[in-house]
């Protein structure tokens, strides 16, 4: 979707503010939201792409006007309601009562699981799948697709000519995975000349590298 | 909760919202607060740019390791016990006298957690994400880095699940330093590509 999150190349988004000696978290609630995302993520109600798409659906005003971890909180609450894990009413009611309650005992992300999760993560990469359509050196053009759903093809790189640099292998297609279909396919590192994306004002020496899925690309002469 | 009708919400409103959510999920048995404490502690206190700095220092002193890092980063990072979460499929790109690399995620906040920990606020900000792809040289100047016009700038936008790290140039005059001393020079910003390493 053409949301505010897809901001590459936009202007008017303020100065870059660099905080000296920035703490990892700025408040206790940020810590808890970070922990919650992983704990609830462990339950498997949704995938990362659905989570990204939930954040992308924030209004531009809210997206720009709230701190980063509030985006995560928004994504969590949105998906918990959409997936039927909690009701909106229960969520609102919980805010109006006294904080309380020990955790129940059958928590999926256990203390023991955390070390393994951090050490190993979970690669999305697939070992097997269709043969690649493109190879290093192939000239390609990205599709000019303004999807209303989730997409990892940014606006600034649509309909542009580039060259395949490498084949990263087969991954679920994030654009469809956010909507319940894995549709695994090759992901390619694609190099675009800065001038192809930004015009003559860009340096003729510079380039941008994006990781794009096979369905984002068409062959170019 | 206040009902006094202030234009701004009370500062603890979000604390209440988060606590309510955590309590509700805990009641349902979906989350374990001790496990949450553990993962928070890891990323607040244990996992950070010092891990990436060790990798960089090793690459600087061991040419064979550097070669492995640049050709098969995943295997090379496993050798040094680097955590894999949000860095399962890594690519390391090398800065040279001719090429300067810089990282961004324009669409969200993808970042190589295993080597750098959680990203700084500016990396996640729309201000940085919008500018670095369009005007990398001007944007880098805001970080105090002026890239020579004769150099090539490569911007890496993490649009898929591959995560990147920049291998900075080893500064001159560091030939006598130990691997640990070299690691102490390497900054987070140099591994994102908004700075160089200086001795």
Image (spheres, rainbow, N blue to C red):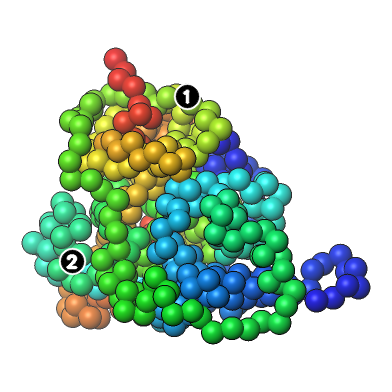
Query: Residue sitting at 29 percent across and 59 percent down?
Result: A122
- Image coordinates for residue A108, horizontal then vertical, percent: 39, 70
The residue carrying mark 2 is B78
- Report helix, strand or loop for mark 1: loop
In the image as oriented, which residue stretches furthest toward the right? B4
Say whether residue B44 is visible: no
**Vertical relation: A64 (above or below) B150:** below
- Report helix, strand or loop for mark 2: helix
Q: Quadrant of residue A4?
A: top right
Residue neighbourhood size for the residue with mark 2, other residues' Cα within 10 Å, grouped as few (<14), some (14–19), many (≥20): few
Q: Quadrant of residue A181?
A: top left
Disc 2 and disc 1 in contact, CB within 8 angstroms: no
Residue neighbourhood size for the residue with mark 1, other residues' Cα within 10 Å, grouped as few (<14), some (14–19), many (≥20): some
**Vertical relation: B65 (above or below) B98:** below
Quadrant (top left/top right/bottom left/bottom right) for the C terminus of chain A: top left
> How many marks overall?
2
Q: Is residue A152 left or right of residue A72?
A: left
- Image coordinates for residue B23, horizontal then vertical, percent: 59, 76
Query: Residue sitting at 12 percent across and 63 percent down?
Result: B65
Say whether residue A192 is visible: yes
Query: Residue sitting at 18 percent across and 71 percent down?
Result: B80
The residue carrying mark 1 is A144
Same chain assignment for discs 2 and 1: no
- Image coordinates for residue B8, horizontal then vertical, percent: 82, 67
């Amino acid at each position: 979707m053409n949301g505010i999150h897809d901001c590459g190349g936009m202007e008017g988004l303020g100065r870059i503010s660099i905080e000296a000696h920035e703490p990892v978290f700025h408040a206790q609630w940020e810590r808890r939201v970070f922990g919650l995302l992983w704990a609830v993520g462990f339950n498997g109600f949704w995938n990362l792409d659905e989570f990204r798409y939930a954040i992308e659906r924030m209004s531009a005003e809210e997206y720009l006007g709230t701190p980063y971890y509030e985006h995560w909180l928004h994504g969590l609450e949105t998906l918990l309601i959409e997936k039927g894990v909690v009701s909106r009413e229960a969520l609102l009611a919980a805010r109006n009562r006294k904080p309380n309650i020990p955790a129940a005992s059958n928590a999926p992300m256990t203390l023991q699981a955390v070390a393994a999760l951090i050490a190993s993560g979970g690669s999305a990469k697939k070992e097997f799948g269709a043969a690649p359509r493109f190879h290093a050196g192939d000239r390609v053009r990205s599709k000019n697709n303004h999807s209303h759903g989730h997409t990892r093809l940014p606006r600034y790189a649509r309909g542009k000519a580039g060259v395949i640099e490498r084949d990263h292998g087969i991954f679920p297609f994030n654009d469809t995975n956010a909507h319940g279909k894995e549709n695994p396919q090759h992901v390619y590192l694609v190099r675009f000349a800065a001038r192809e994306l930004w015009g003559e004002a860009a340096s003729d020496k510079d380039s941008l590298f994006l990781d794009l899925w096979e369905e984002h690309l068409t062959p170019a002469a | 909760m206040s009902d006094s009708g202030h234009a701004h919400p009370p500062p603890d409103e979000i604390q209440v919202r988060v606590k309510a959510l955590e309590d509700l999920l805990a009641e349902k048995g979906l989350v374990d607060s001790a496990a949450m404490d553990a993962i928070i502690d890891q990323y607040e206190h244990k996992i950070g740019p010092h891990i990436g700095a060790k990798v960089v220092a090793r690459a600087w002193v061991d040419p064979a390791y550097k070669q492995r890092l640049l050709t098969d980063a995943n295997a090379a990072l496993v050798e040094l016990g680097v955590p894999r979460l949000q860095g399962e499929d890594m690519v390391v790109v090398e800065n040279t006298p001719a090429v300067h690399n810089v990282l961004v995620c324009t669409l969200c906040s993808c970042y190589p957690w295993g080597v750098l920990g959680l990203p700084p606020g500016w990396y996640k900000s729309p201000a940085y994400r919008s500018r670095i792809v369009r005007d990398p040289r001007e944007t880098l100047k805001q970080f105090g880095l002026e890239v020579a016009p004769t150099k090539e700038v490569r911007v890496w936008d993490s649009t898929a699940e591959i995560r990147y790290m920049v291998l900075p140039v080893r500064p001159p005059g560091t030939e006598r330093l130990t691997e640990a001393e070299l690691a102490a020079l390497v900054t987070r910003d140099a591994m994102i590509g908004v700075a160089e390493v200086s001795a």
